[in-house]
Image: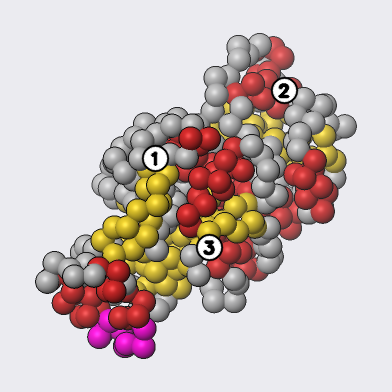
Amino acid sequence: MNLAALTAPPILAGLGRFEASSTWATVARRGILPSMRAMALREPGPIEEKPLALVERPEPEPGAGEILVQVEVCGVCRTDLHVVEGDLPLRRPGVVPGHEVVGRVVGRGPGATRFAEGARVGIAWLRHSCGGCRFCERGAENLCLQPRFTGWDADGGYAERAVVPEAFAYALPEALPAAQLAPLLCAGIIGYRAYRRSGVRPGGRLGLFGFGGSAHVTIQVARHEGCEVYVFSRGGEHRALAEELGAAWVGDSRDRPPHPLDGAILFAPAGELVPPALEALDRGATLAIAGIHLSPVPCLDYEKHLFQERTLQSVTANTREDGRALLELAARIPIRTHTHSYPLEHANEALLDLKQDRIRGAAVLDLG
Ligand SMILES: [Zn+2]
Ligand SMILES: [Zn+2]
């Protein structure tokens, strides 16, 4: 049996939603799953050694309450780099990274009714929270004791198709191109949460340390709220984009801004930037750390870095409410993301460019 001949799009194209599901279910029952192309992790290692390999795999099967998504575009996030290089411990051998997935519903598991076939949806980092722990109960599902994450605990969007519990998928607008939407699903949401955690009020002075995919979305939210934005970045390309997006001041990571900051976000995964970022804060201000992984933070001097009620605040994943709020705001502002597209099989190259700071805005894999 030639599995490639059973790829989903030709089978599903033109079929109604019920027929599409039943076609999929029939194929699945026979044990002949359509195959798909994916970039899977052979074993964690330096991205220079191309740890991701192009593989042909049976497409995933949507379980109860899950949807099967035909991937159009998947954003490339720094967390993918941490998974691929082993900064985050391997949780699933052969994992397919990718958690900024924009696609369409092409199959529904038992009981999945939230989305129609063909609906445009997004798959993000958080794909499960228990709903019953003390954190879920108080609305802090980002701190859930038993969470699961896309592209780490389960296969993600560096593939032609992916599954996700429908409760954790996002409804996406049709108006924006898929490549525009993808970076919002992690870079955008995390930047938004970090911005809120920085405590900067509308019109305040916000510092952004590092200016990649996440920061270039965050600056648009902050500018929309009338903030003055101070960008600390070493890359020329990044600095030019920051100016284009309305930064009030652009300097090097260790430069002192002309005014003390009312809040700041550290996007670069560089712990050595924590002391200078804290020094740039005004009294009572907060530094939010947006990344999931940070190199060691040097010794802090209480007087110089923390006294006067300065706060160091980590940001851990996000709630679905953060996601909905950012997507709603993105459509209203509207946020324009700057992206650089790569084909699926060039995922290693995209991650290398990300690591070497060569991407203006955000990288995406285009599977369209
Ligand atoms: Zn929980
Ligand atoms: Zn991410």
Membership of 327 in magenta stretch? no
Number of the label disc, if any, that sits on residue 366: 3
113 and 308: which one is in front? 113
Quarter of the image that includes the N terminus:
bottom left
Q: Earlier in the sequence, mark 1 or mark 2?
A: 1
The residue range painted magenta reads 13-20
Q: Is residue 144 visible?
A: no
The residue drawn where x is 43% and y is 65% is: 71
Q: Is mark 1 within 8 Å of ligand 1?
A: yes
The residue drawn where x is 29% and y is 58% is: 57
Q: Residue furthest front?
A: 2
Q: Which residue is mark 2?
A: 276
Q: Is residue 42 visible?
A: yes
Q: Position of residue 44 (x, y in %)?
A: 40, 34
Q: Say above or below: 105 vs 365.
A: below
Label 1 crowd (10 A; few <14 / some 14-19 / many >=20) = some
**Tag 1: amino acid:** Leu
- The quarter holding residue 171 reads bottom left
**Tag 3: amino acid:** Asp
Q: Which residue is mark 1?
A: 143
Label count reads 3
Q: Is mark 2 within 8 Å of ligand 2?
A: no
Q: Please state if 152 lies on the left or on the right of 300 as rendered.
A: left
- Spatial CA distance of label 2 from label 3 is 38 Å
Q: Earlier in the sequence, mark 2 or mark 3?
A: 2
Membership of 18 in magenta stretch? yes
